[in-house]
Image: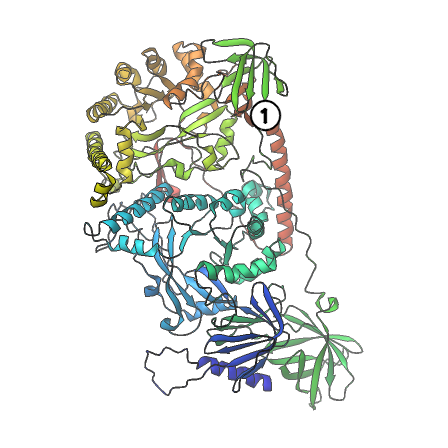
């Protein structure tokens, strides 16, 4: 029983070491011990790359005193023989909510009245989602149950993060010891935490991702201003935000695109975030690597979908299927790309999946050494705590785990977890004891004892003259066995004893009640024979190809730019040459090189255009596709938000609209407020990342809105709080906003005129992102697209613009434009309208299909837009309606979806017509481009065929084959006992500019 007594002594020593809190009085006698323990004969992994065999680990007072092969064991040390066992540094999880109160996120929508102002009392930030004054250490309480769960996974140290809000305050590094809070906190402020999630805040702003980005940017600016102007405003939150900037910055995101969005904010303010991701980073590995951000990687792999029913299978997207297959390879791909990362158990529904999923990542290609590094050294280093945890060097905390074997082996068990020098038993199983033993019972002939199954659920067979099954169980080092004498004699032999160093021994009782001594010595450890029922050689893991974008119609290889010569087509130039018959177009180096007849070009790929038509690419002046959110529909003025912050390059509408000949779109904010957000102008470069979609050097635009939406005509009475509630109030919002913007602009211009010496003595104005965008309008650096319908409001908007000294660039929708076309021409405004939309709400009851033609005839630059994801696929037909209803010429009608929107976007020097030197944004149609039978055969953007009708057919076949392969793989996975999830039917939302209720989510989407 020596072994049992030794372990018990260790436990007593660990519980009474001198690491106890010295400032607390004690009710009882003092029991101060040194906690001096030596673990001998172990395989010790001192760090992720160093392993010492037959080594000794000496700990004293909760710290590592020595480690190595020739450690001298001091007198008085308790010696633990760890032969056959492995010792690893305690694992570190740098993203948990351990010991902190649960955060309940608030959902603000139609069912509740908006809360425009903070309800938090005191000198804090104006927005409750900004809470940097929160210090996790002040909320932290030791949670013995949760600590035990985490210790079972091998963790000894965790970062406790209060996951509430956008600026979340500071997180605390704590151990999982069962001590007082004062004793387990290693760093009270180890990191600052941020996110794009407003958390428990009930304030309506921000209600969008772009609003969260804007709020965070403004907070950085306000904190900088407050630091320089401390006497102007006493703000606890801003001071805390500045103070928190000194610590490592951890930014939590929910998907891969937000990694880039967060990193962009960090770059703007000189912060390199550590980003806690969501496990899909492999899908944008190049872009992730370019951020240079260390990642916290979760192993929350999705379950296979239950796709036995073909109808259920159709509800699972190709991207979801591929993510199920490829998610376990995320860590390996990040490692191969050279991305620094740490593992976390965050987001796992069942924490027991953590180590099995780490092992799965290793099977998918992650080296074991890198896995251990991501669990120890990397998180310790990122938290600047590598002098305390993450390895077992001299002077480090005595945080370590004792395992039965290789930590990442499927059959391994974590036996004990020592935290701050205290022992915590993890399992009653003493080690991986599976194998074949020689069993001796009294004077009976030797038997073979075979233990198979799993280490925690063993299966016992006893072999003598014949084979019988039995039962075996462990409780700590204690073991009990029972089995029949033989197949004929069913009476049981019952044995009990203890397990020590691959040997079992003790006393037992035969069926006749005779007491005997017994022993069992291991003779074949973990042979194939012993493990045949419980372990199989894993098949080589085959994965499908990565596709770009990671969505339906994504491709393994991007189409390339090449020289293209289209011959003998009808060419619609939109230039003075008009429409050319039997003409040629040469595309070279992403530009239109030549337009004419009988062209030739060495090395160019020739396309026969006989019977076909070539036009410039269609330009959609008013679109809402490819966006993760359309409205920041809270405040009346939200000019600080930017659509470029929420561009989603994987939106299938990009590909669909390429199939309709669209090459460029202006992505507008919705019409929920008089002053909406800043626009993004993109080219539909399918497969490129969001930044690569943006049109380089394009002028900057912003969305304004008039009418029913901005005054909440279609909202419940709960939403009668926000000003304005009338059309008169809308006018005053504009007057007030631009009056403030003028004062803001004047203040900055006055400051910028000062010499550097004078500026050093003068406080700079506070930088305000909202007013900054409006000042850009006043200075001719940003241009307005204004949602409008009614004649009176259009007049009002032009009047306000004249009064404040700016121009309205474009009135969009403008269904009563025919009533005020002369005034629009005089003002200098263009019009972007619908072909024949009418009567879908009261303010459009006077719409007529001749509207576009009348504005055009009055000299107004007029375009036809979609404002609708589906309509954009047939804008050529929308343009044709002006031919049908108003007798417009075909060439002028085509210009309304090509050259004219290019003019409204100030891009007509680059696109909109087939002129040499312009961008090679070109469509090859199989029929007359204004015909309902016409469809693009090829759509070129920058000379690259991002859509090709023939390739589209091949993509469809390839996708179906890939789906069949993945469905079969999921069926096989389910048959093998894997968990499955039920496919979810998702409600799709048609994107347009109107405000609609979304009862399913008790929220609203105001397009």
Residue most extreme to the right: 465
Q: Position of residue 310 (x, y in %)?
A: 60, 42
Identified at 41% across, 67% down, the residue is 174
Where's the C terminus, which quadrant? top left
Q: Is residue 219 left or right of residue 371?
A: left
From the image, tell me which residue sits under label 1: 562
Q: Label 1: few (<14), some or many (≥20) within 10 Å?
A: some
Viewer-closest of 587 and 207: 587
Give the quadrant of residue 84.
bottom right
Q: Is residue 929 above or below residue 679?
A: above
Seen in the picture, residue 777 relative to 190 is either above or below; the reply is above
Residue closer to the observer: 792 or 222 = 222
Q: Give the camera-side residue of 804 and 720.
A: 804
The quarter of the picture where residue 948 lies is top right
- Secondary structure at numbered mark 1: loop
x, y percent for residue 630: 37, 36
Q: Residue furthest front?
A: 757
Count of marks, rendered view: 1
| Position above or below: 353 against 783 | below
573 or 968: nearer the eye? 573
The image's colour scheme reads rainbow
- 778 vs 644, left or right, is left
| Image location (x, y in percent) of residue 168 | 35, 55
Judge left or right: residue 653 versus residue 839. Answer: right
Q: Is residue 835 visible?
A: no
Horizontal side, residue 305 vs residue 123: left or right: right
Looking at the image, can residue 145 be seen? yes
Q: Quadrant of the N terminus?
A: bottom right
The x, y position of residue 385, in whole percent, is 44, 64
The residue lying at 68 percent from left, 65 percent from top is 534
């Amino acid at each position: 029983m020596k072994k049992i007594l030794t372990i018990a002594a260790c436990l007593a020593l660990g519980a009474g070491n001198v690491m106890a809190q010295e400032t607390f009085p004690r009710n009882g006698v003092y029991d101060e011990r040194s906690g001096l323990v030596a673990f001998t004969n172990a395989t010790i992994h001192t760090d992720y790359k160093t392993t010492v065999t037959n080594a000794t680990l000496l700990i004293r007072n909760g710290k590592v005193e020595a480690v190595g092969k020739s450690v001298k064991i001091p007198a008085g040390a308790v010696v633990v023989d760890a032969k056959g066992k492995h010792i690893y540094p305690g694992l570190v999880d740098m993203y948990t909510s351990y010991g902190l109160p649960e955060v309940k996120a608030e959902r603000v929508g139609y069912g509740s009245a908006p809360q425009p102002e903070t309800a938090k009392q005191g000198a804090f930030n104006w927005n409750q989602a900004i809470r940097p004054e929160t210090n996790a250490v002040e909320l932290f309480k030791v949670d013995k149950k949760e600590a035990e769960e985490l210790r079972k996974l091998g963790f000894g140290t965790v970062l406790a993060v209060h996951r509430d809000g956008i600026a979340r305050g500071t997180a605390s590094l704590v151990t999982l010891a069962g001590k007082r809070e004062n004793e387990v906190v290693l760093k009270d402020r180890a990191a600052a935490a941020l996110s794009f999630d407003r958390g428990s805040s009930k304030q309506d702003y921000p209600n969008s991702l772009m609003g969260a980005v804007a709020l965070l940017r403004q907070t950085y600016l306000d904190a900088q201003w407050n630091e320089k102007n401390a006497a102007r405003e006493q703000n606890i939150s801003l001071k805390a935000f500045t103070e928190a900037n000194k610590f490592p910055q951890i930014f939590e995101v929910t998907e891969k695109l937000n990694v880039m969005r967060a990193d962009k904010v960090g770059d703007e303010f000189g912060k390199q975030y550590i980003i806690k991701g969501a496990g899909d980073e492999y899908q944008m590995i190049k872009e992730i690597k370019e951020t240079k951000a260390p990642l916290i990687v979760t192993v929350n792999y999705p379950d296979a979908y239950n796709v036995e029913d073909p109808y259920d299978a159709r509800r699972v997207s190709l991207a979801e299927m591929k993510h199920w297959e490829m998610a376990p390879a995320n860590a390996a791909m990040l490692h191969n790309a050279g991305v620094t990362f740490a593992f976390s158990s965050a987001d796992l529904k069942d924490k027991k999946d953590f180590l099995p999923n780490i092992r799965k990542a290793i099977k998918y290609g992650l080296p074991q050494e890198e896995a251990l590094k991501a669990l120890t050294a990397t998180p310790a280093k990122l938290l600047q705590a590598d002098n305390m945890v993450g390895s077992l060097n001299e002077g480090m905390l005595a945080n370590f785990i004792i395992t039965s074997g290789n930590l990442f082996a499927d059959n391994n068990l974590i036996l004990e977890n020592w935290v701050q020098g205290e022992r915590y038993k993890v399992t009653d199983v003493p080690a991986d004891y599976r194998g074949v033993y020689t069993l001796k019972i009294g004077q009976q002939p030797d038997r073979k004892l075979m233990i198979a199954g799993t280490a925690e659920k063993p299966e016992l067979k006893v072999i003598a003259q014949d084979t019988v099954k039995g039962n075996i169980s462990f409780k700590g080092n204690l073991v009990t066995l029972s089995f029949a004498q033989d197949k004929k004699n069913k009476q049981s032999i019952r044995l009990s004893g203890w397990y020590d160093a691959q040997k079992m021994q003790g006393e037992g009782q035969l069926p006749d009640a005779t007491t005997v001594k017994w022993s069992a010595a291991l003779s074949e450890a973990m042979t194939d024979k012993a493990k045949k029922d419980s372990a199989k050689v894993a098949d080589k893991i085959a994965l499908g190809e990565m596709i770009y974008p990671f969505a339906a119609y994504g491709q393994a290889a991007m189409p390339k730019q090449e020289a293209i010569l289209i011959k003998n087509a009808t060419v619609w130039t939109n230039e003075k040459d008009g429409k050319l018959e039997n003409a040629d177009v040469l595309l070279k180096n992403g530009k239109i090189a030549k337009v004419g007849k009988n062209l030739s070009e060495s090395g160019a790929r020739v396309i026969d255009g006989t019977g076909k038509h070539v036009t410039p690419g269609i330009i959609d002046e008013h679109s809402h596709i490819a966006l993760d959110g359309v409205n920041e529909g809270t405040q009346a003025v939200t000019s600080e938000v930017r659509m470029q912050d929420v561009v989603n390059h994987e939106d299938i509408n990009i590909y669909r609209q390429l199939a309709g000949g669209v090459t460029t779109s202006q992505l507008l904010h919705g019409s929920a407020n008089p002053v909406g957000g800043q626009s993004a102008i993109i080219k539909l470069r399918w497969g490129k990342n969001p930044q690569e979609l943006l049109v380089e050097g394009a002028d900057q635009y912003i969305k304004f809105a008039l009418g029913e939406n901005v005054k909440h005509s279609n909202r419940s009475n709960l939403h009668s709080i926000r000003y304005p509630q009338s059309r008169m109030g809308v006018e005053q919002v504009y007057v007030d906003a631009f009056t403030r913007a003028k004062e803001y602009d004047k203040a900055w211009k006055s400051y910028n005129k000062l010499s550097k010496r004078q500026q050093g003595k003068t406080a700079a104005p506070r930088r305000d992102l909202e007013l900054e965008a409006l000042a850009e309008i006043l200075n001719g650096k940003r241009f307005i697209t204004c949602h409008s319908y009614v004649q009176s409001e259009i007049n009002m908007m032009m009047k306000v613009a004249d009064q404040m000294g700016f121009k309205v660039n474009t009135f969009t929708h403008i269904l009563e434009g025919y009533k005020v076309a002369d005034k629009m021409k005089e003002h200098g405004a263009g019009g972007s309208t619908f072909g024949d939309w009418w009567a879908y709400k009261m303010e459009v009851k006077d719409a007529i299909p001749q509207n576009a033609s009348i504005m055009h005839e009055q000299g107004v630059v007029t375009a036809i837009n979609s404002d609708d994801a589906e309509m954009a696929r047939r804008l050529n037909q929308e343009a044709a309606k002006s031919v049908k209803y108003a007798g417009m010429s075909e060439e002028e009608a085509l210009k309304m979806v090509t050259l004219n929107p290019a003019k409204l976007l100030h891009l007509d020097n680059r696109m909109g017509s087939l002129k040499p030197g312009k961008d090679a944004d070109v469509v090859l149609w199989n029929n007359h481009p204004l015909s309902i039978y016409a469809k693009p055969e090829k759509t070129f953007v920058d000379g690259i065929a991002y859509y090709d009708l023939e390739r589209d057919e091949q993509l469809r076949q390839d996708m179906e084959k890939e789906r069949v392969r993945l469905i079969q793989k999921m069926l096989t996975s389910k048959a093998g006992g894997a968990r499955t999830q039920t496919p979810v039917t998702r409600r799709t939302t048609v994107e347009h500019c109107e405000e609609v209720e979304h009862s399913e989510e008790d929220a609203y989407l105001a397009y």
